[in-house]
Image (cartoon, helix red, strand yellow):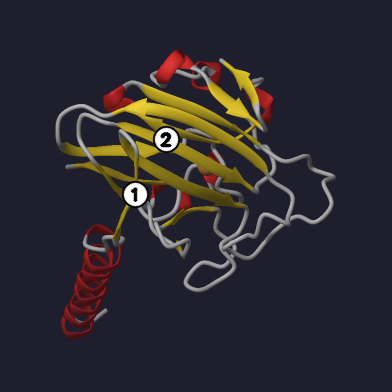
Amino acid sequence: MSVGAKALAIACATALAIVLVAIYIVDFLAATPSTVKAASAPGGARLTLQTVASYGHSPHPDWVSYLVQDGGGKWHHTTVFKVPAHSLVRVTIYQYDTATGLRNPFWSQVRGTVGNSMTVDGKTMNALDPDLASHTFAIPDMGITVPLKGVADDAKNQCSVAPCPLSMAHTTITFTFRTGKPGKYRWQCFVPCAASFIFGNGGPMQSPGWMDGYLVVA
Ligand SMILES: [Cu+2]
């Protein structure tokens, strides 16, 4: 290879590396989902979420995701939720995805909620069979973990395009937790639910706006 050809090859490789770094910064590091304020409720706030097996829209129609409902009943594709400090947050999660299962059964216990419990379709529970978990809603810095029971694999009427309506197969999980001082707390799912990614932990599992996000306590 001539010196000129070598120099050209190095220049092309350098340019490609710069483009990839720029895409990484703009598309991943700087991409921040919008913030949705939880609806006000006596003593605090009411946070309503849903999880879906596939978002059904661009940019990733086949990615698993969370969505949040605003006080007016409209669903938003974001995972940044604003709730008041030093107050009770009553959470309802409509879970439309089937189970993937937890590798670490620690995350199948309900921890950090009022009474260390949740209700699943109206039944009070303190833990879930790890194999039945579809996702978790966990805020490690607040000591909160809630495992979410998946719908049966053979359930009729499964939803694949968000937002999913209550007429489609789902489980309903409710729990309440108390917020402390203001801050920005990371929350995430711990079920390796990202189908078609290595060990189920890529794509939506490491992208804010899908399987993780922030709880903004203000
Ligand atoms: Cu998940």
Neighbour tally class for label 2: few under 14, some 14-19, many 20 plus, Cα within 10 Å: many
Residue at the spot of label 1: 38
Towards the viewer: 105 or 174: 174
Q: Amino acid at mark 2?
A: Arg
Residue at the spot of label 2: 90
Quarter holding the N terminus? Answer: bottom left
x 75%, y 55%: residue:
158
x 40%, y 38%: residue:
188
Q: Is residue 102 visible?
A: no
Q: Is residue 8 visible?
A: yes
Q: Secondary structure at mark 1?
A: loop
Who comes first in sequence, dot 1 or dot 2? Answer: 1
Neighbour tally class for label 1: few under 14, some 14-19, many 20 plus, Cα within 10 Å: many
Is 134 drawn above or below residue 162 in the view shown?
A: above
Q: Secondary structure at mark 2?
A: strand
x 29%, y 45%: residue:
214
Towards the viewer: 24 or 13: 24
Image x and y of residue 153, in percent: 79, 43
